[in-house]
Image (cartoon, helix red, strand yellow):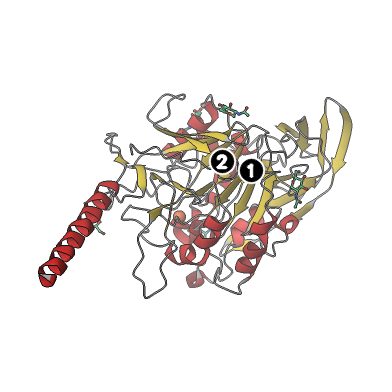
Amino acid sequence: MAKIGTSSRVAAAIVAVLGFVLSLAVVCNGGKTSSFVRKVEKTVDMPLDSDVFKVPPGYNAPQQVHITQGDQLGKAVLVSWVTVEEPGSNTVLYWSAYSKKQKSEGKVTTYKFYNYTSGYIHHTTIRNLKFNTKYYYVVGIGHTERQFWFITPPEVGPDVPYTFGLIGDLGQSFDSNKTLTHYELNPQKGQAVLFVGDLSYADNYPNHDNVRWDTWGRFTERSVAYQPWIWTAGNHEIDFAPEIGETKPFKPYTHRYHVPYKASGSTAPFWYSIKRASAYIIVLSSYSAYGKYTPQYKWLEQELPKVNRSETPWLIVLMHSPWYNSYNYHYMEGETMRVMYEPWFVKYKVDVVFAGHVHAYERSERISNVAYNIVNGICIPVKDQSAPVYITIGDGGNLEGLATNMTEPQPAYSAYREASFGHATFDIKNRTHAYYGWHRNQDGYAVTADSMWFFNRYYHPVDDSTSAQ
Ligand SMILES: *[C@@H]1O[C@H](CO)[C@@H](O)[C@H](O)[C@H]1NC(C)=O
Ligand SMILES: *[C@@H]1O[C@H](CO)[C@@H](O)[C@H](O)[C@H]1NC(C)=O
Ligand SMILES: *[C@@H]1O[C@H](CO)[C@@H](O)[C@H](O)[C@H]1NC(C)=O
Ligand SMILES: *[C@@H]1O[C@H](CO)[C@@H](O)[C@H](O)[C@H]1NC(C)=O
Ligand SMILES: *[C@@H]1O[C@H](CO)[C@@H](O)[C@H](O)[C@H]1NC(C)=O
Ligand SMILES: [Fe+2]
C-alpha cells in the first residue's frame, strides 16, 4: 500500500514536472522572424567620384565637419574638421540670436598610416553654451569659411522629451546613403545620433586605405555637422595591421573622432558617459579590456551608482558587439562581456542596450541570464522586468552586406528579427514613456516596421513586452 502510494506520488510529480516543462515550452516560443522579402542585390561602395564625396570648393576649405557632445551635461559642443592644403586656423566662430559672436580655439593633429598621410585634423570645443538654443558656427577662418548650425539640448531633467536616432555599421555603400537619407527624412526627427560603432569600413580596402576615412567624413557631414553623433568604437575602428607596420590600435579613429571621455572620469576615449535631456548614456568598448581590475571595469563599477534616475530616468547603454544575437554571424562574440557586466545591468535597471556588429536587425524581450554559477546548470535566459531590452541595429548598410542566416528555431528571448538595412529612433516623451521605432530602407519615411512603447524601468517598471502572453 505504502509502496503504491509512493509510486503514485512519484507519478503525480512526474506529471507535474511534465506539465511544467510543457508550459515552459509554450512560454519558450520565439518571437517574430519577419517574412519581409527584399530584393537581393550586392551591397557596393559608392565610387570615389560620387556626389556625396565631393570636396568643398575653395582654398583650404574645411571638410568632414562633424560635431559631438563636448562635456557631460550638454553645454559644450566639440567641433572637428579637416583642412588639406595647410593647417589654417583652429578657431570656431559661433553665435546665437541672443549672443554676440564669440571665438573658441582648439588644436590640430595629423597622423600617418602606412603610406597615407592625413590632412590637418582640427578639434575645437565650444563651452558654456545656453541650453535649447540654436547656434551658428563658422570654420575655415582666414581661408575658405563654411557656416553650419546646431541646436543645444534642453537642460538635463526627468521629463525632458528628446529624440535619438540610432545608426550602426554604416559604411559608405549605396545602401549606407539610403539609410542616412531615411534617417534625415524620418518625420520622427532625430535630434542626435547614437552611433553603435563601425564607421567607414576603410579597413576593408588594401592597406586600410585611409582615403576611405576621408570620404566617409565627407559623406556623413550633411548630418553630423548639424547634430551630434555620439560615437562608439567598433571592430572596424581598430585598424590593427602589423603586416604593414601599423601596430597601434584605433589610430585613425582616435585622431579623427574625439569624445568627451575625461568629463565622465574615464581614462580612455573608448568608454565614457554623457547626460542629454532625460537620458544617461553609457558607451562601452567591446574591443578594450573589460575583465575584472581593468580600467573599463573599474570605471563602469563606479559609474553605474552615479546615475541619478530622478535626474535622468532613461539609462541607455551603447556597445558594438551584442550580448543577445540569434544570427549565425558573430554568434556569442559578446558573451564574455555579458558574463562580466550583465548582473550590473539588471541591478541598476538599464532601460535599453543598443549594439551593432551583426548586419541585421533584432530586438529582444526583457531577459537576463545571470543565475549560472558553474555547477547549477541554470544558464537559460529568463524573462526579467529589471533587465534591459537588447537591440541590434548593425543594419546601416556597409559593403559587407546583410546577415541573413539566423539560428533556428528563433530563441524565446528574441522578440523580432529581420535581415534588412535601416535605422531606428528612440523618442523619449517623459519620465515613464518612450516610443521606439525601427525603419527599414525599403519603406516610406514614416513607416515603422517594428516598434515598441518603452516603459521606464525606474518610474514605470510594468511589463512592456510586445509578445502575446
Ligand atoms: C600606397 O601603396 C599602394 C601599394 O602598396 C599604392 O597602390 C598606393 O598608390 C600608395 N599610396 C600612396 C599615397 O602612396
Ligand atoms: C545619396 O543620397 C542623396 C540624398 O538622397 C542623393 O542626393 C545622392 O545623389 C545620393 N548619392 C549616391 C551616390 O547615391
Ligand atoms: C538626484 O537628482 C535630484 C533631481 O535633480 C536631486 O534632487 C537629488 O539631490 C539627486 N540625488 C543625489 C543623490 O544626488
Ligand atoms: C547558416 O549557418 C549555419 C551555422 O554556421 C551553417 O551550418 C549553415 O550552412 C548556414 N546556412 C547557409 C544557407 O549559409
Ligand atoms: C507620458 O507620455 C505618455 C505617452 O505620450 C502619456 O500617455 C502619459 O500621459 C505621459 N505622462 C505624463 C505624466 O504626462
Ligand atoms: Fe562590427
Mark 2 and ligand 5: say if the CB distance to the nearest ligand atom is below 8 Å: no
Q: Residues within 10 Å of mark 2 (few under 14, many from 20)?
A: many
Which of the pair 214/304 is nearer the observer? 304
Q: What residue lies at 44% left-to-right and 51% top-to-bottom?
A: 384
Q: Quadrant location of residue 450?
A: top left
Q: Residues within 10 Å of mark 1 (few under 14, many from 20)?
A: many
Residue 234 horizontal/vertical position (percent)? 51, 56
Tell me, for residue 456, which label it has, or none.
2
Question: x, y (%) of residue 347?
Answer: 56, 57
Disc 1 and disc 2 in contact, CB within 8 angstroms:
yes
- For the point 78% across and 47% down, the residue is 125
Question: Where does residue 27 sit, x and y in percent of width and height?
Answer: 29, 47
Check disc 1 and report its element: helix, strand or loop.
loop
Instruction: Give the CA distance from mark 1 to mark 2.
Output: 7 Å
Q: Position of residue 232 (x, y in %)?
A: 57, 53
Q: Nearer the viewer, residue 140 or 307?
A: 307
Q: Is residue 162 left or right of residue 176?
A: right
Mark 2 residue element: loop
Q: Which residue is mark 1?
A: 313
Q: Quadrant of residue 44?
A: top left
Q: Quadrant of the N terminus?
A: bottom left
The amino acid at mark 1 is Pro
Please indicate whether residue 274 sits to the left or right of residue 100 in the image: left
Lower position in the chain sequence, tag 1 or tag 2: 1
Q: Is residue 102 above or below residue 7?
A: above
